[in-house]
Amino acid sequence: MTMKIGLHVAFFSVLAVLAFPTLAPNSSVAHSQESAPQKRNLTVDDYFRIKGVADPQISPEAKWVAYTVETRNLKEDKNEERIWMVATSGGEAIPLTAESVSSSHPRWSPDAKYLAFLSEREEGKKQVWLLNRNGGEAQQFTDAIQDVSDFAWSPSGDRLVLVLQNPTQDELEAAHHKEAEKDAGEKPKPKPRPWVIDRLHFKDDEVGYLDRRRTHLYVFSLGDRKMTQITSGDYDDTAPAWSPDGRWLAFVSNRSADPDRNFNDNIWVVAADNTDQGKNLVHVTTGPSTDGAPAWSPDGKWIAFTSQLDPKLFQYATFHLAVAPSSGGEQKVLTRSLDRNVSSPHFSADGKWIYFLADDDGTQNVLRIPAAGGEITRPIGGRLMVDAFSMAGDGSVAAQVGTVERPDEIYLLPVGGELRRLTTTNDTLMAQIRLPSVEYVHFKSKDGTSVAGYLYKPPDYKPGNRYPAILHPHGGPVGAYYAEFDFQPQLYAANGYAVLTPNPRGSSGYGEDFCKAIYADWGNKDFQDDIAMVDYGVAQGIADPEKLGVGGHSYGAISTNFIITPTTRFKAAISDAGEFLYVTNWGHDLYVREWEIELGLPWENRGLWEKLSPFSRVTKITTPTMVMGGDVDWNVPIINGEQMYESLKRLGVPTLLVVYPGQYHEFHRPSFIKDRFQRNLAWFGHYVKGEGPAIPPEKVAD
């Protein structure tokens, strides 16, 4: 369950200028129509052949774009990330870092001569490394006791701001004995220590138990390589952004009396050269909700940021674009009429515009608005997904763009020009694959609400034939299916299924009212909307009503759990990291704040907790259900899956529990990801299609 971060609905008047352009077949973002040898359907192993292209960083003078490419290596059972570079004028991409070690977070120096990045090349600690663009080996730049989690160049290029968490006792001891360890030639093993916890929010997925070690900002001088701590206290400080003159740093921090009890992140400013660890701060935003992603105007007078306006709605509230004086004062919300979640604000170099991402109607585009407010336009629009972008000094934009037919690649929007693709990372592979037809469709829910979703048809689809179908609810609940290459529904379609991926109420991208419609009411309106897409698929003559399956991950699994309690329409279900008996999660998962805000305390409002829990209706489940999860998932702990499996087993419902060791909410180990795909296909193949065994051979991941 990702609790923090449609459906065709009427756009607000401001959106009249934001209509999606139609992508022509020969468009630079459309699917390649080049002829190719005999194509084949997508397979499980293609997941590990597709490379993940991300984090485009255009150089200040707009000549180069650095980006990362992730490779999922089945043979070595690990993931690797490399940094590449491509000229904005076009040409072959150039690898900048080695294959043997992961490198990430490339950031250009202000003069574009150097590229800094994060890597664990020495002693297993993630540090900042530096590459000269003209060539040569990368040089380690920082030597902190602990991992560097983030950094940013100062405008003059003589300093970096680092984001570091307070070191552990083991890290302090290791640093103290570093020279002795070198002499001995052997690093002593850390001693086991008890977790001593005194916080309300005491767990995080992929971290585990939380203590009082906090994340703060440090300024690192490139000249003498000295590091100075500039924020402190029992708070976490993140997302640093330099002022244009290099004197100040804006950052995000929840400095309320008890940050574990709310989501009151505010924007703060601290002097970059302070020597008192940030005792004197400027409180830029003071609202009770969540603010984030600060970005300075070129004149240093304003800070743009994202802001939620209703703290009671927390995850269901829209993230708006706002600005406030950098010295503190009244903030101005610029996107009230847009009513879409925004992220990643950037000022143009002349300060006239603010560019940002907005998720909208099953897409995510780059939008812009005058810095003083006004008409919103869409520099990069269409039925596509922009995951990230960066801007050069001349206004050129480098963007990470995907479509339902193409995995993400790097694109360039030059000043006054058209969007064009710079990279071809996955072209050779995709030219071999026969993809399904994917349509963005609209349909009516039970109460007349207009809903939308993506419908995948098998590659060999023939009108008039019905196909076994899988309803695949998305995670969140505040999430959505977008116009991007989504491997799992693509895989199901390649195996002969029609795949239904709805954006029911609760989904992002259709306005706050649509999103909050499921607040404290999971499994009601969203259930109706999910089922409405099944009815739509059947009514269109595409889905076979006698061969239906349902399954999802996270909130998609929660949806699956309550979908199979009131209906027996589905022949099979897969619940992957879902919740079952909600009260079990209280004090066990990482969502103590969210549960209390939305449902109330379980000893005070137990009736609602029980009413919403699928466990309360477990005796109505007859659908054969496979339950899955990771054994160290603190987002949705595996105890949910264990309780669901045990209940179904006791009731005589065909079931299977698959637990993956060492995996968090999101799996990282390639062999386990392959295993999960193969088990999903086998389970649905057996119970929905009536083909093969429900459980594949013992050695699935090879």
Image (tube, grey):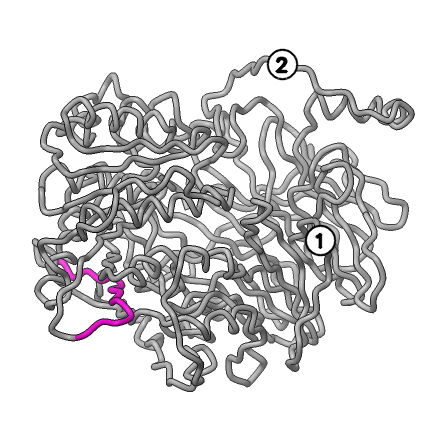
**Residue drawn where x is 49% and y is 41% of the image:** 286
Pick the front one: 467 or 472: 467
Residue nearest the observer in this picture, 348 or 588 = 588
Inspect this view and state whether residue 179 appears: yes
- Badge 2 amino acid: Arg
Magenta residue span: 449-462
Label 2 crowd bin: few (<14), some (14–19), many (20+), radius 10 Å: few
Q: Is residue 100 placed above or below 415 in the rendered structure?
A: above
Could you say where residue 208 lies in the image, as x and y percent from the top left?
A: 52, 27
Residue assigned mark 2: 193
Q: Quadrant of residue 70?
A: bottom right
| Crowd band around label 1 with a 10 angstrom C-alpha radius: few (<14), some (14–19), many (20+) | many
- Which residue is at a point 56% across and 38% down the rendered structure image? 253
Q: Quadrant of the N terminus?
A: top left
Q: Determine the residue positioned at 71% across, 33% down.
A: 146
From the image, tell me which residue sits under label 1.
Answer: 117
